[in-house]
Amino acid sequence: MSRGRTGRRRPAGCLTVLAVGVVGLVIVILLWYLLAGCLREPGPGPGPEPGPGEPTSQPASCPDVQMISVPGTWESNSDDDPHNPTANPASLMLNVSGPVQEQFPAGRVDVYTVPYIAQFSNPVAIPPDGQASYNVSRTEGTRRTFDFLTQRQQECPLTNYVLAGFSQGAVIVGDIAEQIGKGNGPVRADRVLGVTLIADGRRSGETGDGQPIQVGTPPPGVGGAGGSDCSRDHHDRGP
């Protein structure tokens, strides 16, 4: 997992290779969970009783795993179909979510691509470029991701999650994952199987315990989005 951006755009071929690596990582996580569930041997006796109000079943329509995919800037729009996104056929995240959909039946893994405005206006463009600001776009993306997770958790309390995002979407996913880890998110932390961030503007560049697992060679530098203050500027960069 990488939370980062560099100051240069990388060739499309580099992004494709990176996407293939991310697909492999996501599929390994999902296979690990799904196969482990199928092969788990029964214990010697019943486990601890669930806590008060904790469900022990959910509707058959619920997936075992819910994958949340949040595209980057200019890769989505507010009206896109979350289960058949077509806003940008060249979206990098389609190279991740598409193979996952092909690998697993919908009943086991449901892929939800968050539709949001996904724009980043140039504040000094003359004439104005007519796009939404990064702050407005990220706010909508965060709210839609949070709301869907909240709704899914209420409907499917036993479903587990994989979260993935690119560029502006990586910032959105990373911020929500941080809240989940702190116990303030829409789902329980123990329901999250993994989080994958590509070209994350909040990447600190730090390594070691408690830091993200890097896929491939980490790029130099740090992310351009800064802290959680939405007044901070942001610049899209390659991974």
Image (cartoon, rainbow, N blue to C red):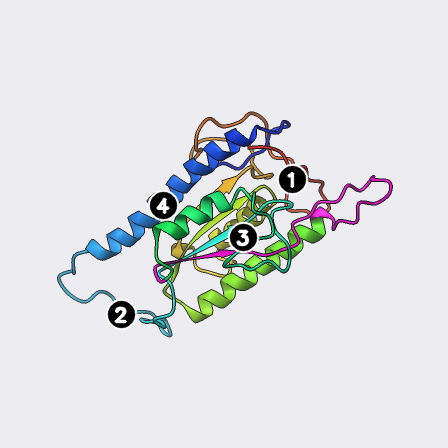
In the picture shown, does residue 64 fall above or below 177?
Answer: below
Q: Which residue is mark 4?
A: 27
Q: Is residue 77 left or right of residue 92?
A: right
Amino acid, disc 3: Ile
- Mark 2 or 4, which is nearer the eye? 4
Marks 1 and 3, how far apart in space? 15 Å
Q: Tell me the magenta residue range.
A: 107-134
**Image quadrant in which you'd find residue 222:** top right
**Residue furthest toward the left?**
44
Q: Position of residue 61 (x, y in %)?
A: 38, 70
Front disc: 3 or 2: 3
Residue 193 in the figure: left or right of residue 122: left
| Distance between mark 3 and mark 4 Cα atoms | 22 Å
Q: Residues under labels 2 and 4: Cα distance?
A: 32 Å
Residue with the mark numbered 3: 176
Q: What is the three-letter code of the residue carrying label 2?
A: Glu
Name the quadrant of the C terminus.
top right
Closer to the chain start, of discs 3 and 2, is 2
| Residue at x 50% of width, y 61% of height | 149
